[in-house]
Image (cartoon, rainbow, N blue to C red):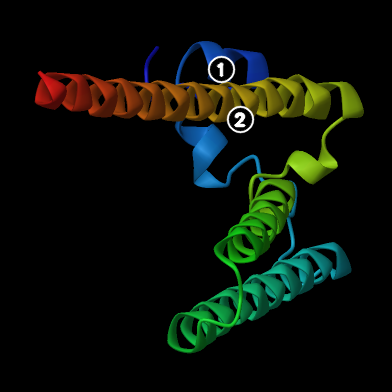
Amino acid sequence: MSAHHHSDNVQELYEGDQSKLYSGVLSHHHDINSTESKGQVKRIWKITLWLTIITIAEVAVGLWAHHSGAFPKVFLAFYFLGLTVVKAALIVRVFMHLGDEKKNFVMAIIIPLTLFVWFIIAFLADGDFWLRMNNTQAHTRTEQVQKW
């Protein structure tokens, strides 16, 4: 567990001093001028450009829709949700390196995430139902009291 050992055994690093794991000593790219490194940098810039374009499109449509009122709110909600999912997928795939992982590992993350999103939607729908039901019952009770 000492920070002074000089072993290059990755297993020992996981069990002990992890500073080499995150310091770049065990980097996959030994030469930053190699074609592999330049390709990775080009890929990162390409994804950054796509994220910028999508964000500009979201802001532009949001401002235009706010001032013109031309689009129904449901359309705008699905538009923004769709673009947000695309941006999240790009970020997870490139910047979190999930695009380079095995399919089983990706599914082990995507399936629970999908279930979690379904869980949130189900609870919001249930909460909306109970809110409407309580408001309706309160309105009915008020009318009954006023009749007496």
The residue that mark 1 highlights is 14
Lateral position of residue 144 relative to residue 14, left or right: left
Picture quadrant of residue 115: top right
Tell me which residue sits at (45%, 80%) in the image. Answer: 66
- Report how far apart the C-alphas of labels 2 and 1 lie in the structure: 33 Å
The disc at residue 60 is none
Tell me which residue sits at (21%, 19%) in the image. Answer: 141
Nearer to us of marks 2 and 1 is 2
Three-letter code, disc 1: Tyr
Which element carries disc 1, helix, strand or loop? helix
Residue 119 seen by the camera: yes
Picture quadrant of residue 86: bottom right
Tell me which residue sits at (74%, 62%) in the image. Answer: 31
Q: Position of residue 121 (x, y in %)?
A: 57, 30
Tell me which residue sits at (25%, 29%) in the image. Answer: 139
Q: Position of residue 110 (x, y in %)?
A: 74, 29
